[in-house]
Amino acid sequence: MKTRVQGFLCAGVAACVAAGCCSDKGVDVKKSGAVEPSVVVKPFGKTKDGQLVNHYTLTGAGGVVMDVIDYGGKVVRLYTPDRSGAKTDITLGFNEVAGYETQDKYFGSLIGRYGNRIANGKFTLDGATYTLPTNNAPGSIPCSLHGGDKGFDAYVWHSEPLSEGKNVGIKFNMTSPDGDQGYPGKLDITVRYWLTPENVWRIEYEAVTDKATPVNMTQHLYFNFKGEAEGTILDHELTLFADRMTPVDKGLIPTGALVPVKGTPFDFTTPWLIGARIDADNEQLRFGGGYDHNWVLNSQSGKLAPAAALYEKTTGRYLEVWTTEPAIQFYCGNFLTDKVPGKRGKNLCHRGGLALETQHSPDSPNQPGFPSTILRPGAVYKTVTEYRFGVR
Ligand code: BGC
């Protein structure tokens, strides 16, 4: 494994682009054979308040390449091979920090302290009521989304390169102070991204607290297997290893019920094209403007188990999502618009990407029937999610 700071080590696509040996302008990069794993670090500009941001290119021994910044742990680019071996950037992101600050802060980002929604931005824990920023209001009903006004997506994390055998990665650390966005307790967080020779992107989340607090971290990467800004994801085929989902009200807050998906447009227990039933006459689909819901995974063991699979037939790209988490949010980019510029000068579009966010179900701090998200002092929050890339 090679590590270079400010390097032109021509092992990663971004480094190749910097060195002028391949193009990032939509031209697929062909590679064959084994690749030497590497981590290349370079600057990625500054946040609007002047913090320096580092940019890492992880080149996995299996050929997957990821560009990641330590601002929010955001994956800026993700190159995976198609059926013929051609690599394309299959995720949404921006070329500059300002894009994330002004357009969409969640693209490719780590999300916390609490991923997804908390009703009215309020919860009660051990007799005390806590108030969070209400930064979102589907159906004009305010809630707290993805950790509040300044979630973990908006922090510059401390970061360092990792290597272990043929695996390469990045370690991120940060401390969220007591009272951060209204949440109790000082939370110390470590997240590790690993890229393996088997083309697995493994994410390990860890946190400890000094006061009881809800924690529900996730990753908000968007996929489009045809390539960034190459149309909608309605033609992607999705499988969800979940027999039940959590229906929501028009504020996208779970009602508390766990409802079987059988016989509904939410049944992805066998592979379905995302677009096949999205316009069905269904109240839940109307509330979400399409799919923006939480599925209860069949595995509730806390052990790594399959959560989702995604396939796109023209490129052959195939993904399996495995997680230790009990639920997954499938969001098909209903709020994305063609006003958002892509990285290659082409605008995105409505449903131009989809997110598969492993987590506990939304609003768990107010839902006694859902598995608890409360982390207490002395306990360690530990979850793992793997995105396993391949072709079919
Ligand atoms: C949620 C969407 C929300 C989006 C914001 C997703 O996790 O499910 O409702 O609009 O995040 O990026």
Image (cartoon, helix red, strand yellow):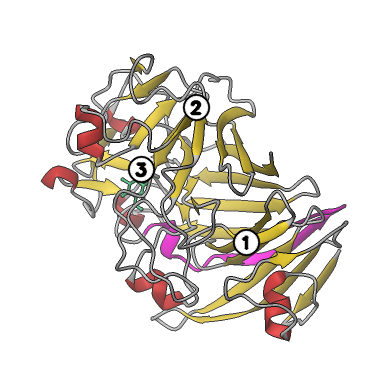
The structure residue drawn at horizontal position 23% and vertical position 25%, both measured from the top left corner, is 255
Residue nearest the observer in this picture, 87 or 276: 276
Image quarter of residue 28: bottom right
Left or right: where 177 falls relative to 58: left
Q: Is residue 50 above or below residue 144?
A: below
> Callout 1: 10 Å neighbours few (<14), some, many (20+)?
many
For the residue with label 3, is its CB less than 8 Å from the closest atom of ligand 1?
Answer: yes
The structure residue drawn at horizontal position 39% and vertical position 81%, both measured from the top left corner, is 49
Residue 346 colored in magenta in the image: no
Kindly state the secondary structure of the residue where label 3 is placed: loop
Earlier in the chain: of badge 3 and badge 2, it is 3
The structure residue drawn at horizontal position 50% and vertical position 36%, both measured from the top left corner, is 237
Earlier in the chain: of badge 3 and badge 1, it is 1
User: Which amino acid, by three-letter code, is at mark 2?
Assistant: Pro
Residue 164, position in %: x, y?
83, 53
Residue 378, position in %: x, y?
55, 36
> Callout 3: 10 Å neighbours few (<14), some, many (20+)?
many
Which residue matches tag 3? 116
**What span is colored magenta in the figure?**
151-169
Instruction: Kindly give the residue lying farthest to the front in the view shown.
Output: 314
Numbered disc in front, either 3 or 1: 1
User: Which amino acid, by three-letter code, is at mark 3?
Assistant: Asn
Which quarter shows the N terminus? Answer: bottom right
Q: CA distance from mark 3 to mark 1?
A: 29 Å
Residue 61, position in %: x, y?
82, 56
Which residue matches tag 2? 326
Report if residue 386 is visible in the image: no
